[in-house]
């Protein structure tokens, strides 16, 4: 059976952008390999959840991987925490966190503390604290990111975020989303932790240093996405596919780990623009044929869009493209089933995730080709796949392998 | 009102095949009439159940005919038995059967006994037997096929197949799929019948003759697809269409009969490659205007794919195509609504049904045309119908007649 390689460029889809002469970054990029793969394969437009739904990266990935987020999703916290290496237990409540900058009136003036290089020193300051019998577990992610897990009795995930989600708003108090005592208790823990983090963070030498350099200090912790871990069938149980994940950013490793995929580390896979794409793709090929399904995640396309950098996004796509060369012959020899797509569009003009469809290409074993020979948001409108939904993707790929269970007789 | 003719080429869709220079058999075939019909009509891609579902012929036909198999399907046995002329009663349990070859250790070495020419002599050996108060009704189908119906009290269809479905596996014992006494009883009847069939079949003169010729003997009976008959609204009740069926193979006649269609026999309609396609199409035209809906089924495209014969499939399509000539002028004069499509794809490289879409063309009265002028899996990607589902087909055709019930006011 031919192995499947699924490459997700996070936030790849975009809009026509003025500085790119009203091309999208993907359309404007010189990317001979991705275009060749579109030519060798079949293309289309993917609604990762469904038409008109603007997805977060977490639910979009669940949906693409065939786990309907309506049944499976329970907040991003547990994924993020798992990705950072915390073994989340069923009674835990997990949050995503940001190091942020607040002013003396507790107004959030930078939600990412200037995308500080590392949150490690700050995570360590709160990791292991105990508040009213609840243990705090904190682990650093990329840049400003921190995962926080509350462990103990009587915890609930029905609590609101402390993150105001936009700047120039005050740091919020967490409140209970139900009348339940456990959620009131949990909100009180979150608020006490937020105060404690502020007192510990603001006096840290790194912040003194940052202030001296005119950089925004990481003086506060914003928490969001409270969730408890759901029960997930593993990818192997659900699809009978032995799966591996190659990713830099924590969330994607977390999702993959929760779905029972093997996490394969690649040196220099940072989840940033400097990430080792060459190494990731080489590693994916090295894993053949030991794995049936290899999920490769590339994060920087999303971050660059959210930062409003369409030209840099275009350049990053061009850089990434050159490392796809070794996949071409594998596709031509029909040795693999390769899919390249995205979890959602991120419009680099308005700097947010959008519900705009994403282009998709599938090439290799068993594929009926189409006439499209460019990989782009508009060229894929003519693709043979038409408009498809995330929920159908894995079934489509398994059918190419010839392994779909027969319905009827 | 214009009559509808629906031609189903079973298992027509295929994959790019190396020996055909990576064309599909349909793409590679010279088929001026089918291409002309595509040009005269509208085309698209049909998911007979839904995207990613790999259908059996039975559920695919139910779905295309507007009977959602999720509600209507109850195992293939009853369809097959009805098609062979058994009047299946509601308390009966019906099976599909194969004559097969087993060795002295009861290992199945040929699931079709070398596609033996006829199963008639063997069906007669078990037809009319009585086992523990249950009457056995057996009727021969094409080649190795036999339908078996159990008639009597306390029968259940919750029993497993004796057919191992792959070769080099032992003939299986049927077991009860529930804790129910009736299903345990039914499984015991199936097992006793299997033993009895083996004792009767192995010593039959036809088998002595086959063994002398070096052909695999039809020394055993494999049963599968146990089912009880569901209640079906007739096609006339459901759609107010007076319907007829022209088919060679038993399953399709069975489905049509269950839906209350008239079964029209055509001499030489065998369901094999030697079938009388000319006679079938002439007969369909002769039935106008007495019938509103004429379903014509052509089986050999599927059998050739399952046997891994893409070149023969291409040649068969070419042969069939020439008999479509009389339909062209009926379409051009808008006297009929003609649909040509398939129930599922069968990939002749991997020799199985797949979930790949099938091409569809609709031509004649009321049809908006599109730019497609070739009938093929990839040319129909550009069709005006886009991607459609089986459940929508009959409604689409009735709308062309101008007979769809108004919703709203």
Image: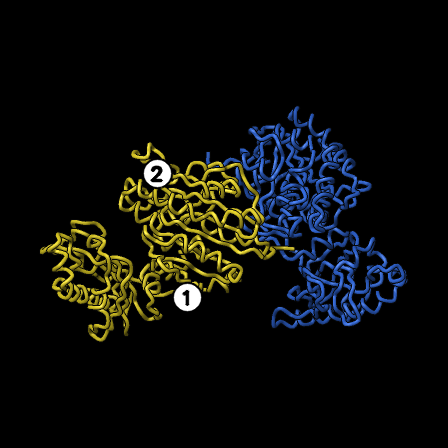
Chain colours: A yellow, B blue
Q: Are marks 2 and 1 on the same chain?
A: yes
Q: Is residue A285 left or right of residue B309?
A: left
Mark 2 in CB contact with mark 1 (< 8 angstroms): no
Depth check, front residue: A286 or A381 = A286
- Residue at the disc numbered 2: A15
- Residue at the disc numbered 1: A231
Which quadrant of the rendered structure holds the N terminus of chain B? top right
Q: Is residue A307 left or right of residue B267?
A: left
Q: Chain of mark 2?
A: A
**Occupied quadrant, residue B171:** bottom right
Q: Nearer the viewer, mark 2 or mark 1?
A: 2
Q: Residues within 10 Å of mark 2 (few under 14, many from 20)?
A: many
Q: Residue A328, labelled with which disc?
A: none
Q: Position of residue B349 (x, y in %)?
A: 65, 50
Residue ID at (18%, 57%) = A172
Q: Position of residue A3 (x, y in %)?
A: 53, 56
Residue ID at (33%, 59%) = A76
Q: Chain of mark 1?
A: A
Depth check, front residue: B285 or B137 = B285
Residue reaching furthest left? A104
Residue ID at (13%, 59%) = A209
Q: Is residue B383 left or right of residue A244?
A: right
Q: Is residue B252 at least partly visible in the picture?
A: no
């Amino acid at each position: 059976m031919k192995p499947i390689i699924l490459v997700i460029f996070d936030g790849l889809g975009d809009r026509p952008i003025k500085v790119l002469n009203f091309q999208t970054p993907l359309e404007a990029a010189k990317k001979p390999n991705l275009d060749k793969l579109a030519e060798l394969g079949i293309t289309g437009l993917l609604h990762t959840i469904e038409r008109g739904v603007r997805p977060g990266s977490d639910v979009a990935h669940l949906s693409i991987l065939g786990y309907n987020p309506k049944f499976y999703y329970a907040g991003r916290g547990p994924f993020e925490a798992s990705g950072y290496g915390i073994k989340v237990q069923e009674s835990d409540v997990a949050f995503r966190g940001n190091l942020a900058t607040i002013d003396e009136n507790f107004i959030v003036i930078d939600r990412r503390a200037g995308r500080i290089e590392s949150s490690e020193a700050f995570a360590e300051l709160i990791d292991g604290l105990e508040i009213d019998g609840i243990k705090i577990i904190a682990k650093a992610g990329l840049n400003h990111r921190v995962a926080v897990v509350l462990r103990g009795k009587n915890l609930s995930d029905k609590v609101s975020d402390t993150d105001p989600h936009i700047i120039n708003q005050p740091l919020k108090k967490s409140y209970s989303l139900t009348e339940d005592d456990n959620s009131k208790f949990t909100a009180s823990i979150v608020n006490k932790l937020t105060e404690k983090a502020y007192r510990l963070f603001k006096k840290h030498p790194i912040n003194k240093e940052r202030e001296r350099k005119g950089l925004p200090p990481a003086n506060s912790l914003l928490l969001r996405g409270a969730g408890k871990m759901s029960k997930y069938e593993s990818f192997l149980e659900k699809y009978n596919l032995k799966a591996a994940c190659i990713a830099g950013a924590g969330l994607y490793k977390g999702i993959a780990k929760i779905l029972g995929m093997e996490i394969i580390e690649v040196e220099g896979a940072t989840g940033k623009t400097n990430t080792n794409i060459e190494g990731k793709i080489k590693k994916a090929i090295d894993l053949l044929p030991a794995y049936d399904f290899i999920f490769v995640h590339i994060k920087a396309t999303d971050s660059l869009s959210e930062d409003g950098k369409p030209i840099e996004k275009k350049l990053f796509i061009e850089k990434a493209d050159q490392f796809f060369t070794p996949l071409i012959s594998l596709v031509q020899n029909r040795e693999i089933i390769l899919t390249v797509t995205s979890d959602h569009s991120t419009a680099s003009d308005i700097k947010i995730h959008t519900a705009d469809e994403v282009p998709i290409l599938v090439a290799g074993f068993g594929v009926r080709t189409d006439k499209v020979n460019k990989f782009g948001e508009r060229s894929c409108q003519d693709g043979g796949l038409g408009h498809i939904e995330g929920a159908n993707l894995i079934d489509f790929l398994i059918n190419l392998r010839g392994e779909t269970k027969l319905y009827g007789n």
